[in-house]
Image (tube, coloured by chain):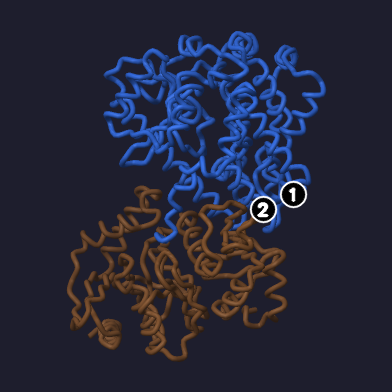
Amino acid sequence: MNLRELPPEDIRRRLAGPGLCLRTGPITVRIRSRLPAVVHTLALLYADHPVVAEEAFCDFHVRLFQPAGLRRWWRPQVQFAFDDFVPFKPLPHDHAFPMLEWGLNWAVANHAHWYLVLHAAVIECGGRAAILPAPPGSGKSTLTAALVQRGWRLLSDELTLIDPDTGLVHGLARPVSLKNTSLPLLRAWAPDAVFGPPAHDTLKGTVAHMKPPPESVARMDEPARPAWVIFPRYVPDAAPRLTPHPRGHALLEFARNAFNYSILGSRGYDTLARLIASVECFDFHYSRLEDALATFTRLAHGD
Amino acid sequence: MATDLLLRLLTTPAEACSLAPAQWDLALRQARRAGLTARLALVLEEAEALGAAPTTARRHLGAAVVVARRLAQALEWELACIQAAVAATGAPVMLLKGAAYVAGGLPAARGRLFNDVDLLVPRPQLDAVEQALLEHGWAPMKLDAYDQRYYRRWMHEVPPLEHVRRQTVIDLHHNILPLTARYRPDPAKILAAARPAAQAPGFLVPAPADLVIHCATHLFHEGETDRALRDLLDFDTLLRHFGRTEPGFWQDLVPRARALDLARPLYYGLRYAHRLFHSPIPPAVMAAAAEHAPPKPVGWAMDWLAREGLRPKHASCRGPSTGLAHFLLYVRGHWLRMPPHLLLPHLLRKALPHWNRHRAAKPARALDKV
């Protein structure tokens, strides 16, 4: 059963009580919260995700709540708990949903060590995956959001999970985090896309999450074979340019930014080296989403 | 019952075969909150009960073992760096707690997580060792003037030192309890009996009895109970190991604790390790330790506090009186650390937020990185 088939009253009851268990690809989370903002945005953006039985095994238990004390009335805050442990400082109340998303990213990156977890977006077309590692501000999420609205499948916009045994990438198909000027850009690019309410003045500016396309969620259990590693960079007014990226450098770049590369030790290195050896690496400079779509389409069709 | 699920799995791993997925779920939460996930994985593996876990649970157990292995490896490297820094001082440097278990090649190190490296040096050489560490990239963690003074004047350690590049932390001690504490162990006696660390050349580790006594002392002097169950499991593991491998270990244990003025914490350790982990303690040793038991009413109160404090800090282990017990343990921890005329002004100071600015100024965890 998908979340959209669950009556709103049921969603609220589960979130307030035993927890709502949602499956995002290989990871199942139990979410608890009484905050209306979390209830509504979750129901909106995870509508296509499967709901799991209450007594199932869940990988992570997370809870969003208002810290006790005076702050309940004066500039209310929101707090994130993971297995009853509070890893972060509280955030302003209206950052509740972004905090849930960041908290889930943190939980996966810090515990799912049966994968090599890279800090990169990953999308798929025709059975082949493109991994997009990039520092914040490079337009990685914008590009990901734009492409998955035009035929590419979303695996993840932040966490690339690589199975060390198979070399395949596993997707979570969770909402895509968009910031500041990307928001109007994406709304214009995909008028039918669904967005959660924007949260202002977060650590990253104004943030809103885009609902993953239903096809991506429906196929979230299909892992994909990595084919390309593409370092995107938004350059104002630039013509699209796809140039080879040195493999050795790509490996070092991943090693630096992966969440658990050092924890996995030699297994992390072997997995990464095998990945890099099996893909083509590119730099991609662009300024217009139309150009990016054209380039990625050509790549997927092998021209 | 759900409350002691983790404890049952640790003591009778065969029970794993009858767990439903929801119980595996709960066991993992409790293990994570107690810092015992990797340890649980190893206990289950040894009992050949790991196969009973569903794949979903098993991969978390495996991940915890990967992390623990990595931390142990990082600790070995850290010890080599510390040795390179302090060797020139010629001071004897003794490792305590987790670092000592690793350096001593002891089974208590298996699956254990490590945060800080605890060192003990003779007080006359404290300044030289601190200076050597400062010259090799460690720097005092940011503390306000009050906390600096508090450490220097009353504590058994200098303010924590953090390596500027690796962000690893050293707690440099010159005693095992604060100078103001009720009990007055003589660190010179512990240093004199210390042995070379089998796995970390250049370092010393406490003699078996001292290691066990220090483990109990640390556990029953802490006001914070986050790692209490883990510490008691360490204690049990040390007892079993030395009881098997160290001639005269049991006979010497209580007299040694008496000589160090630490017989009371040893008694508590033996009592609760036996209760929770069924540690095989010879009756004569238990009887000798019991001579140092507190008066009956205190003992009853302590039984209750220990029962609450030794549970994992998870909602499923919380009873109606758990909050009160944690508060009392916190007060007790301070009570044992300092006499009231020092304690009251200190707690008052800590309770007033504007005097406590360095706490508030701690940067938020880097949420924006994920």
Q: Is residue B248 left or right of residue A224?
A: right
Badge 2 crowding class, 10 Å Cα cut-off, few under 14, some 14 to 19, many 20 or more, is: many
A14 in relation to B14, above or below: below
Q: Are marks 1 and 2 on the same chain?
A: yes
Residue in the image at 41% along x and 75% along y: A178
- Percent position of residue A77, x then y: 57, 62
Q: Chain of mark 2?
A: B
Which mark identifies residue B305? Answer: none
Where on the picture, by quarter, is residue B178?
A: top right
Location of residue B235 (image quadrant): top right
Q: Nearer the viewer, residue A195 or A168?
A: A195
**The hue in which chain A appears in the rendered picture of the protein:** brown
* Chain identifier, colour blue: B
Crowding near the residue tagged with mark 1, few <14, some 14–19, many ≥20 C-alpha atoms within 10 Å: few
Contact flag, marks 1 and 2 (Cβ < 8 Å)? yes
What's the residue type where badge 1 is placed? Ala
Is B290 positioned to the left or the right of B139 in the image? Answer: right
As rendered, which of A229 and B159 lies closer to the eye?
A: B159
Q: Helix, strand or loop at disc 2?
A: helix
Q: Whole-percent x and y of residue A207?
A: 44, 73
- Tag 2 residue: B26
Position of residue A71 measured from the top left corner of the image (x, y, whole percent): 60, 59
Q: Does dot 1 land on a helix, a strand or a loop? A: loop
Residue at the spot 35% in from the left edge and 79% down from the top edge: A181
Query: Can I make out residue B239 in this image?
Result: no
Going by the image, does B108 lie left or right of B125? right
Residue type marked 2: Leu
The tag on residue B2 is 1
